[in-house]
Image (tube, coloured by chain):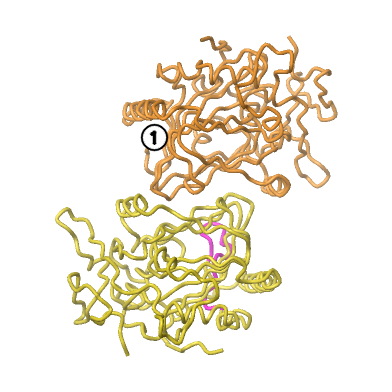
Chain colours: A yellow, B orange
Amino acid sequence: MQTHDSPDRGSDNSHLQVNDSRIDFYPTRSSAKRDHLGRMAWKERSVPTVWADEDSRFSPPTGFDVSGHSKRGYTIQPGLLTPAEVQKYWSELNRLIARSSDTDDPRVIREPGSGDVRSIFDVHKTSADIAALAVDPRVLETARFLLGSEVYLHQSRINFMPGFAGSGFYWHSDFETWHAEDGLPSPRAVSLSIALTDNYAFNGGLMVVPGSHRYFIPGQGNTPDNNVETSLVRQEVGTPAQDDVTELTAELGIDQFTGAAGAGLWFDSNIMHGSGNNITPYPRSNIFLVFNSVANAPQEPFESTSRRPEHIAATEVDPLRR
Amino acid sequence: MQTHDSPDRGSDNSHLQVNDSRIDFYPTRSSAKRDHLGRMAWKERSVPTVWADEDSRFSPPTGFDVSGHSKRGYTIQPGLLTPAEVQKYWSELNRLIARSSDTDDPRVIREPGSGDVRSIFDVHKTSADIAALAVDPRVLETARFLLGSEVYLHQSRINFMPGFAGSGFYWHSDFETWHAEDGLPSPRAVSLSIALTDNYAFNGGLMVVPGSHRYFIPGQGNTPDNNVETSLVRQEVGTPAQDDVTELTAELGIDQFTGAAGAGLWFDSNIMHGSGNNITPYPRSNIFLVFNSVANAPQEPFESTSRRPEHIAATEVDPLRR
């Protein structure tokens, strides 16, 4: 099996760091390299964003802008779900939330303050509809194409940001956490967010820094024990320094994910993203599926003494099949 | 002097409420009328938005969309300030902030938490540049035209929303507060916000509900003593009910004030508006001038036992002259 960091993929060995006798290509938090001013050093990505190549057995969906995806790190697919499917999954989301309103199930994450349900994890195991969506050819074939291999779900969830009081999420790279706390060796993972509500510019939609997936920006701080208990509500450890976000956005700008319900957003696991709050009456809901390559199976966490629970970070590498 | 509520202006007497033996055309907070379900009753506006009429001695600025302003309640003027003027006022703003960084001057409002300067009030009295701006023909003639009379400044301030941590402002009508706490009888007032930074959709820009100025939506709660001490940082009393905002936006939608630095936004004192937070590195600064008609001089507050300080709500009706 070819690994992401084999020499023929052009990896850059100058930033290597040894951790637990393993090679850590993405040192972060307590392992981050620092320059003479104490600033954490960025690392240019040496592995592809789109892994399938011309002689691959995987092909892109019709109309998919492959080189654009490589460059920007994300692709929006308007109308990935039909209006009838949006309706179906919206009903399913409401059913899942209603069932979770009164439970202390750890898969249910609540808003600070109000206690309203904000996210439910592992929904591909509790919802037949969402399990079917993950292996729908429109979804699965794209994930396989982008990662150039068989894939499995590292994480699944539904998100529900209520109107009026939805809090946002500060800037972060998902891969930073998945590497530090879940042991994914490489950013050979991609997320699909499917909007179940119309996304406006002003109701807490996702902001991404286009092209930021090409740089690994180390996260700040050291992972505390049981970080998972708070980090899903408000991430503090592992977020980038303000100066790094300023530099990144000054060079690359900010794009917003807006559009009608049913749109899909594929975004690289290492893209810098965040969201503002939502004081509008318009709620924002989506289905969120994280695909990881079977060639990028999780190891021991690179920056944590404990592993996050299975419903947040799968350790079983079980390739998706239709 | 013709008052806004004289019969020939077509005022609707069905919602009158007597308060301190005065007629209160805009009952709010403890005086709000309620329907049989306990919901506070909206009142349709009976006074004009644009007061100057065809035989007025005031004329609109070239290109100003007068009927659009009446309908929407706001008008954006791109390039109201030249780039050189933006630079001048930006420098002035930074000078004023630097001078205020270490003071307990009550005119300086700070961010909760960080203590960073968020607003400075009464800047037309402390800055010759801003005093000159208020009587610049591009500004003063428009204010006179919209209000159909001589005008004075009810309030002036500069706002500085920092990047990364700027908190927003919940939905409100300025007039609701100016009526309840400052005693303005009628919404014969207009605000001008001039952007000194580029306004994006995602850095906490102003959101307005177009057309909402035509309805007076009562505010919730009762005015506590010394409400001013907290309401400038986070308004709680006087904000509309969530159901009212939902109904209003469902019917009218939401517009955002985006555009390049130098743009001016004229908005009616009674338009429903708010802003989200700002996690981007891009700060957002503006100059904010509130013009009131000399025919709409403040009376005793309609819903407060105390009057807000002079630097927040002028009681001296001193017509602006070039």
Pointer 1 chain? B
Q: Is residue A66 magenta?
A: no
Is A317 placed above or below A313 here?
below
Q: Which residue lies furthest to the front in this view?
A: A54
Give residue A93's position: percent from left, percent from top.
63, 71
Q: Does the magenta stretch include residue A112?
A: yes
Spot occupied by residue B55 in the image (x, y as percentages of width and height): 74, 13
Q: Is residue B279 left or right of residue B318?
A: left
In this image, A15 relative to A152: left or right? Answer: left
Residue at left 56%, top 71%? A287
Q: In which quarter of the image is residue B209?
A: top right
For the point 45% across and 17% down, the residue is B131
Residue A19 lies, in percent from the top left, at 21, 77
Farthest residue in the left direction? A36
Q: How many numbered marks appear?
A: 1
**Which quadrant holds the C terminus of chain A?**
bottom right
B46 with respect to B98 (left or right): right
Q: How crowded is mark 1: few (under 14 residues within 10 Å), some or many (20 or more)?
A: many
Q: Where does residue A176 sit, x and y in percent of width and height? A: 34, 68
Residue tagged 1: B117
In terms of image quadrants, where is residue A2?
Answer: bottom left
Residue range in magenta is: A110-123
Give A138 or A109, whichever is nearer the viewer: A138
**Residue appearing at x 63%, y 45% in the figure:** B254
Which amino acid type is shown beneath numbered disc 1?
A: Val
The answer to whether B192 is drawn above or below residue A291 in the figure is: above
Is A206 rendered above or below residue A92?
above
Q: In which quarter of the image is the N terminus of chain A?
A: bottom left
Residue B176 picture quarter: top right
Tell me the SS state at disc 1: strand
Give A259 or B308, whichever is nearer the viewer.
A259
